[in-house]
Image: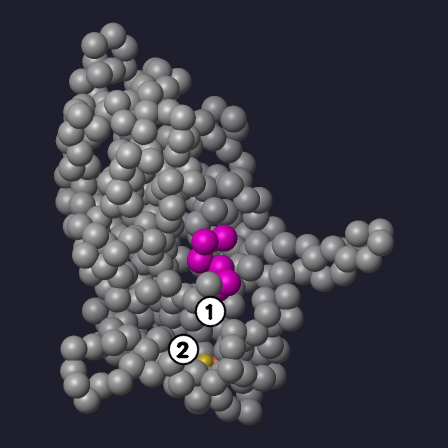
Amino acid sequence: KKTLLKVENLRKYYPIKGGVLSRVVGQVKAVDDISFHVLEGETLGLVGESGCGKTTTGKTILRLVKHTEGAVTYREQNIFKFTSKQMKEYRKDVQIIFQDPYGSLNPRQTVGDMLREIIRYHNLASGPEVEERIESLMEMVGLNRYHIGRYPHEFSGGQRQRVGIARALCLEPRMIVCDEPVSALDVSIQSQILNLLKKLQGELNLTYLFIAHDLSVVKHISDRVGVMYLGKMAELTETDKLFENPLHPYTKALLKAIPVADVDHTPSKAVLKGDVPSPSNPPSGCVFHTRCPECMEICSEKVPVMTEANPGHFVYCHLYE
Ligand code: SF4
């Protein structure tokens, strides 16, 4: 498989302003020097607790927020150097599905009007083809022609997410950043949406960057998974390897916290002591050292380097250097 998107040493720092003069008094290191690539047709899951930088990573890739440093290459071209024409193409090629489609849908616009507007704006079809296209989009996402004239509030949560997916598909993208697309849905609906995304990926050869805070959600949809902690990529490898042989102490703790169908197993959040430190004042050395059960002396002093512990299995921890 070819690399579709490559992220190199990406950083996104937000300034913290304070005082009467609103001077910059510090910075939040939302994403701090992360690198990974996404292959064409694969799903790369990105997981971590809130504030770990996964959503900022997605938004920076989409150029919805401005990066601080580093590069993002899409089809071998640096997206931060795109001309406005290239940017327009990129905005078509790389779409987003939000956690809350309701917040991103115009309440006064029917689904049909929304899709019509996008199709016309981008000159994707004309005349009767417009309506044909809308009907086929609705079918693709498991809705039908009777839903075309409906308003967002007339849909259930799962149906609204289907509308969000139809909107993303409308522009025939190659890649979709799925930002927690099932987090707000009931568990039974979650699997329906995940299955739909999988089916569409097979049919349309889509590439997904799938952002979630829940490892059990990414398990079923991702080919590879990256685990993020406080702006850093803690571990990155194929999904099976991550679940069978997690290496980073943080991933191990996350996996222990997943409930399993076993009476003797009690999911435990207590494996991790304390709360996630503030990204405006991250710990020295390894950012995880204040909570790590395997912390060593070196951990608070020296920043680890991303190491390929096994082929294709990257880990950011002194234990594997
Ligand atoms: Fe734990 Fe040290 Fe590894 Fe960080 S570098 S995860 S503190 S063992």
Where on the picture, by quarter, is residue 4?
Answer: top left
Residue at image x 36%, y 41%?
101
Query: Front-most of 38 and 134?
Result: 134
Residue 55 belongs to the span the image colors magenta: yes
Q: Secondary structure at mark 1?
A: strand
* Residue 259: percent from left, percent from top: 25, 76
Residue reaching furthest to the bottom: 297
Label 2, residues with CA under 10 Å away: few <14, some 14-19, many ≥20: many
- The residue at which mark 1 appears reads as 229
Side of 265 where 113 appears, left or right: right
Residues shaded magenta: 51-56
* Residue 209: percent from left, percent from top: 34, 50
Q: Is residue 222 visible?
A: no
Side of 47 where 298 appears, left or right: right
Label 1, residues with CA under 10 Å away: few <14, some 14-19, many ≥20: many
Q: Are marks 2 and 1 in contact (CB under 8 Å)?
A: yes
Side of 193 where 89 appears, left or right: right
Residue reaching furthest to the right: 20
Residue 160 belongs to the span the image colors magenta: no
Amino acid type, mark 2 = Tyr
* Residue 247: percent from left, percent from top: 34, 79
Name the mark on residue 250: 2
Cβ(mark 2) to ligand 1 < 8 Å? yes
* Residue 273: percent from left, percent from top: 47, 85
